[in-house]
Amino acid sequence: MTIDTTVPEIDALLQLAELDAQAPSLPPEKHRSHREAARRRVPRELLDRYQKLLDVGRRPAIVAIERGGCSGCHVRLPTMLEYKARRSPAIHSCPHCHRMLYAPEFHLKTAHSPISAPVEKAKAANAKALKARNTLGRAIPESAIGSQPGAVQK
Ligand SMILES: [Zn+2]
């Protein structure tokens, strides 16, 4: 399913999605007024669809098309859908997870989806480093026992 719309309308919806994603970081009144301002700029049809997705627990409800796939569920999209998405601004729907899809090309300012992908990446790198350190910490004393106790390097 495709809903034809305009870039500013999609931008407003992305703004709304971003506000919904980071709800705890703003004071409640400020958050509500920002949210209302964004909502006012989103057409009813898109809002309804967005709300429905949130209601069934799809968060984020709107994601970017990345490398020809849905960045929400990572399923490859039909070529026709991708082609249409790149030609004109519209909201498409992922045939697999039904999230709302948009082509990031039309939204250079908000090219990155509201999901904190870099944070996740940093977390993964941290976990890896921690694991490496732990292995190292265990490996040194074990191999040092009985051989050359004085030669252990810190
Ligand atoms: Zn999907």
Image (cartoon, rainbow, N blue to C red):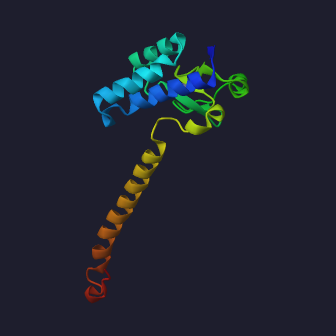
Which residue is at 35% across, 59% downward?
130
Q: In this view, does 60 lie above or below 143?
A: above
Tell whether 29 sits left or right of 126.
Answer: left
Residue 21 figure quarter: top left
Tell me the residue at 29%/28% (across/down): 28
- 55 versus 118 height, above or below: above
- Vertical side of 95 occupied by 25: above or below: below
Q: Where is residue 44 in the image (x, y as percent from the top left)?
A: 51, 11
From this viewpoint, is residue 119 visible? yes
Residue for point 53% across, 29% down: 63
Q: Where is residue 20 in the image (x, y as percent from the top left)?
A: 39, 27
Between 14 and 49, the one lying in front of the other is 14
Counting from the top left corner in percent of width and height, residue 80 is at 72, 22
Q: Quarter of the image holding residue 65?
A: top right
Please indicate whether residue 103 sits to the left or right of residue 20 in the image.
right
Asked whether, in this view, residue 151 is left or right of residue 36, the answer is: left
Q: Could you say where residue 81 lies in the image, as x and y percent from the top left?
A: 68, 22
On screen, residue 26 versus residue 47, left or right, reads left
